[in-house]
Amino acid sequence: MRYPNSVFLTEAWLKKKPDDTRQTKTYLAHFIRTGFICAMLTIISAPTALAKPGTRGNLPWDWTGIIGTGQSLSVGAQGFPLISTTQPFGNLQLSTGGLPWPIDPNDTHLSMVPLVEPVGRHSTNYPSSWPENIDGETPHTAMANEITALVRAALDRDFISVHGAVGENGQGMIYLKKHAVQQGVNGHSYEAALVETKAITRLAKAAGKTYGVSALIVTHGESDAGNANYEKELRQLWKDYSADLRVITGQKQKIQMIVSQQNSCADHSASTQAQWKIGVDYPKDIVCSGPKYQYPYVADGVHLMAEGYRQLGEKYGQIYFERVVLGKDWQPLEPTRVKRDSKTLTVHFHVPVPPLVWATNLELPHQSIAEWKDGKGFEVQRANGEKVAIVSVTISGDAVVIVCASDPGPGACVGYAMVGEKQPMQTPLKGTFRWGLLRDSDPFVGASTEVAQPNYSVAFEKTAR
């Protein structure tokens, strides 16, 4: 996103009616406190940074459905104590009461309630599945509130999203897909999403509201770190959801898939690479939100703290607003090409908000790997997999120039945050095992956490040409 929230809040301020300024005042006060009014004065001079006058955005329904799937991080594993326990806007979720699985979508005990954490019912055992699958704070409430804040401020309209989380803790794609393997309580995540959608469609109609599903959020990949077919399976998941949900709701609009990278499990992880690459291969339907290595983790280096889940939700919300509401072709900070010239490798990037900078607040990566300790997260290998020593890395416009101790040769591979340390990052926060320091200059600040969130580079491996 090419603007701070404060720009939109200030633009919309004079338009607000007295009875709906309370929440906007709260967020405006936040931006004044955090100094973003100064940033606004600089950025407001760029007309492309703002929604065009008269823009109504893509807001086709009264209630907009967003479904989350995945494994432990999708259901907020270890994300406690809960933080998002009040709903400042009108965002909603489906309450299943105490109903056991299987659930009839026409059951009269189903109802719509305010969206707060937990999004659904707490799991009481492991493994678990919907409707009792939530472990802690999920990204959903923060995501919903972020979208609503952005829409109200930018477009002077309300936005109500209805969220559901159908992920299954610890389970791979084999249990999440359509026609999944059934084992114990696991394997009905996909069916649960259809049940939720049918129930909400019915309840929306009864309430006199229009409803459709606009996005699928995928927070997953650890169990599939070695799955060479992961991109193909993600694509099929999108196809199935996009087809089946539209039959239920009667909508024409396709489903936007937003997927984040896992950075905790396995060196050269196939799922991590696929989570980035699928957005390159299918840019209209699927987008990678970026990595998760910049967020605070619990001690295991795999699961996020509650605040980390909220920051992830805000990033999902920012990207949803860009892609779905404004219809922009937002893409993450990602490599576009790698050129080799003897000992020098030049990696060009798509940069969402220039300029590229090095993060100075994170612990230096790869300090236990002598060849890469000066690479700021970059990794160079010969075609045979042998490590090549990095002498220096410097930013030059939209590129990072890597100088190696020797020519890596034809077929050299440049990686970034794909090989881990033995211990997760420890300063300035407890992090995960694979990370890097390259980021852009996006001034975005989350509406709920008040934390600045520039875009960090995706983890990747790419062959030099």
Image (spheres, rainbow, N blue to C red):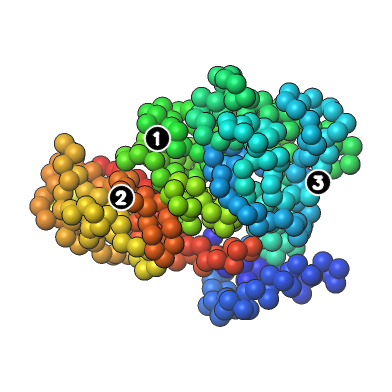
**Separation (CA) of disc 3 from disc 1:** 36 Å
Mark positioned earlier in the residue sequence (3 or 1): 3
* Circle 1 residues within 10 Å: few <14, some 14–19, many ≥20: many
* Circle 3 residues within 10 Å: few <14, some 14–19, many ≥20: some
Q: Give the residue type at disc 1.
A: Ala
Residue 56 visible? The answer is no
Residue in view at x 65 percent, y 73 percent: 30
Task: Report x, y in % for residue 55.
Answer: 69, 58
Residue in view at x 17 percent, y 53 percent: 371
List the single residue furthest toward the left: 406
Query: Would residue 52 appear left or right of 297 to someone viewing this image?
Result: right
* Residue under label 3: 113
* Residue under label 1: 225
Mark positioned earlier in the residue sequence (2 or 3): 3
Image quarter of residue 267:
top left
Query: Would residue 219 appear left or right of 275 to someone viewing this image?
Result: right
Q: Give the residue type at disc 2.
A: Glu
